[in-house]
Amino acid sequence: MAKIVGGITTSHIPAIGKAIAEKDFESHYWKAFFDSYPPVRDWLDEVKPDVAVVIYNDHGLNFFLDAMPTFAIGAAEEYRNADEGWGIPEIPPFPGDPKLSWHIIESLMNDEFDLTTCQEMKVDHGFTVPMQLMWPERWTPEVRTIPVCVNTVQHPVPSPKRCYDMGKALGRAIRSYDEDTKVVIIGTGGLSHQLEGERAGFLNQEFDEMCMKKIVDDPEALLSYSIPDLVRLAGSQGVELVLWLMMRGALSDKVNLLHQKYTIPISNTAAGLLLLENLD
Ligand code: DHB
Ligand code: FE
């Protein structure tokens, strides 16, 4: 049977993609941030997952405000990137795993989560930057990918509880897949940030640190926040926390915290990194 080996949370900021393209790893601005990733890569090298399920939000590349699915999932042979205007070079396509995608889709539908199913899907920085951080040499990729896309852009945005519950259903779906497949779940984005309006640049370190703690041992403590609460406490893009909660829902109740780092600010955002080993 398939096994969920662990979960990772990481920032997905486009500026990281630009720094990667320019190999700007050692400058004063980037060194501490990039230095926090080798322990995660070492773990991935050791555990060797076959598939990465990447939970992210599309920022206007594949979906736009005219038609915005709450939850969408890829079921394609490959996922192409395209220029979003952030100055990140386009990178080669990521391989998919349509068989596992369709298994997850069937299982989630039976569990009353109605997804938009995408047999073609372009992936933006929300997906590509985390993948580049995890597998910098992925030009010979061993890992297949399944993008799970959550609307965090156009309100109404699904609540922390809804996303955590869908994560639970995602975990059940993967564990019921009748193949020896090792799966890692990546929750991208966050933590506090706001890119526009009067509160542009808003960060909340205290709230972020509380979330990084709770998500490990007591994620359900975060489920009573509403989306307006998250906007107030973490900024309008800080609602990306729901992506972390979906990842956490897919893991076992108890997990091993193997690595963590909080870097503030990176661009306009507080960047949080967690590596959680799954215990079931
Ligand atoms: C930034 C953060 C994001 O989450 C994003 O999608 C785009 C930009 C930033 O801080 O620059
Ligand atoms: Fe974002």
Image: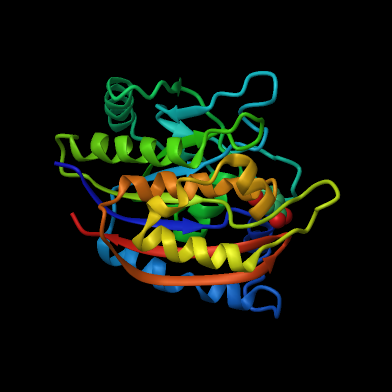
What percent of the width, then of the height, locates residue 63? 62, 27
Answer above or below: position of 209 versus 86. below
Q: Quadrant of residue 193?
A: bottom right
Quarter of the image for residue 226 reads top right
Q: Identify the image quadrant of the C terminus.
A: bottom left
Residue 204 vs residue 128: left or right?
right
x and y percentages locating residue 102 in the rendered image: 31, 25
Q: Is residue 242 left or right of residue 5?
A: right
**Residue at 40% across, 73% down:** 39
Q: As drawn, is 31 to the left or to the right of 107?
A: right
The answer to whether residue 102 is left or right of residue 280 is: right
Residue 154 vs 235, above or below: the answer is above
Residue 54 drawn at (x, y percent): 44, 44
Which residue is nearer to you in this view: 191 or 22?
A: 191
What residue is shown at x 35% (from left), y 46% (from top)? Answer: 249
Q: Vertically, is 171 above or below 218?
A: above
Front position in the image: 130 or 139: 130
Say which quadrant the N terminus sits in.
top left
Residue at the image point whose x is 40% and y is 72% from the top: 259
Residue at the right extreme, as displayed: 198
Percent of width and height locating residue 216: 37, 62
User: Quick check: can you spot residue 155?
Assistant: yes
